Image (spheres, helix red, strand yellow):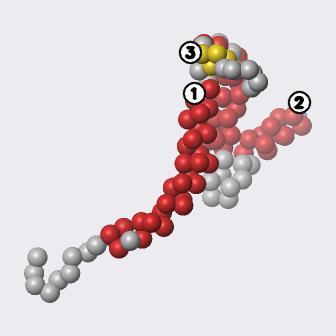
Amino acid sequence: MQKGMKQKTSSINKGYGVFLIPGITAFLIILIIPFLSNVGISFTKWGGVRAPVWIGLSNYQQLIGDSVFWLSFRNNLILLLAHDRDSGHCWVVPSNISIRLHYQ
C-alpha cells in the first residue's frame, strides 16, 4: 500500500455491528425458532394437548397420497406465478376465475 492511502474498513469494524443484534434476535425469535419447531412437530402425531408421539415420516407419506394437498399445492403455485410483484396485487387468477364462472 502506498504511503498516505488509508485502508478501507468495514462498518462492523467501527462498532456498528452491535446495532444488528436486535434485528438478528427478532429474526430468530419470530421466524427461525417457530419454523424449526414446526419442522420438529411435523414428525410427530400431536393433538396439542397430550404429549406428542414420534411417527417419523408417516405424515409426509400420508401427504404425498392426499389429492386435496396436491390440489391446494397446484393452486398455490398458480397464485404464486400470477402474482404481480410490482404492484403487490394478484389480478390474473381472480379475474380468470370470475370470467369462467360468469360464462358457464
The foreground one among 12 and 84 is 12
Question: Quick one: SS at disc 3?
Answer: loop
Residue type at mark 2? Gln
In percent of the image, x 63 and y 35: which residue is there?
77
Does residue 7 show up? yes
Looking at the image, the residue that sits furthest to the left is 2
In percent of the image, x 72 and y 48: which residue is there?
90
The foreground one among 61 and 25 is 25
Query: Disc 2 versus disc 1: distance between alpha carbons?
Result: 45 Å
Q: Which image quadrant for residue 35?
A: top right
Identify whether 27 is placed above or below 76. below
In the rendered image, residue 89, in percent from the top left (x then y), is placed at: 72, 53
Query: Disc 1 versus disc 3: distance between alpha carbons?
Result: 10 Å
Identify whether 92 is placed above or below 63. below
Q: Which image quadrant for residue 18?
A: bottom left
Question: Label 3 crowding class (10 Å Cα cut-off): few <14, some 14-19, many 20+?
Answer: some
Label 2: which residue? 104
Identify whether 77 is placed above or below 91. above
Looking at the image, the residue that sits furthest to the front is 51
Residue type at mark 1? Gly
Label 1: which residue? 40
Residue type at mark 3? Gly
Question: Label 2 crowding class (10 Å Cα cut-off): few <14, some 14-19, many 20+?
Answer: few
Does residue 59 show up? no
User: In the rendered view of the protein, which quadrant contains the N terminus?
Assistant: bottom left
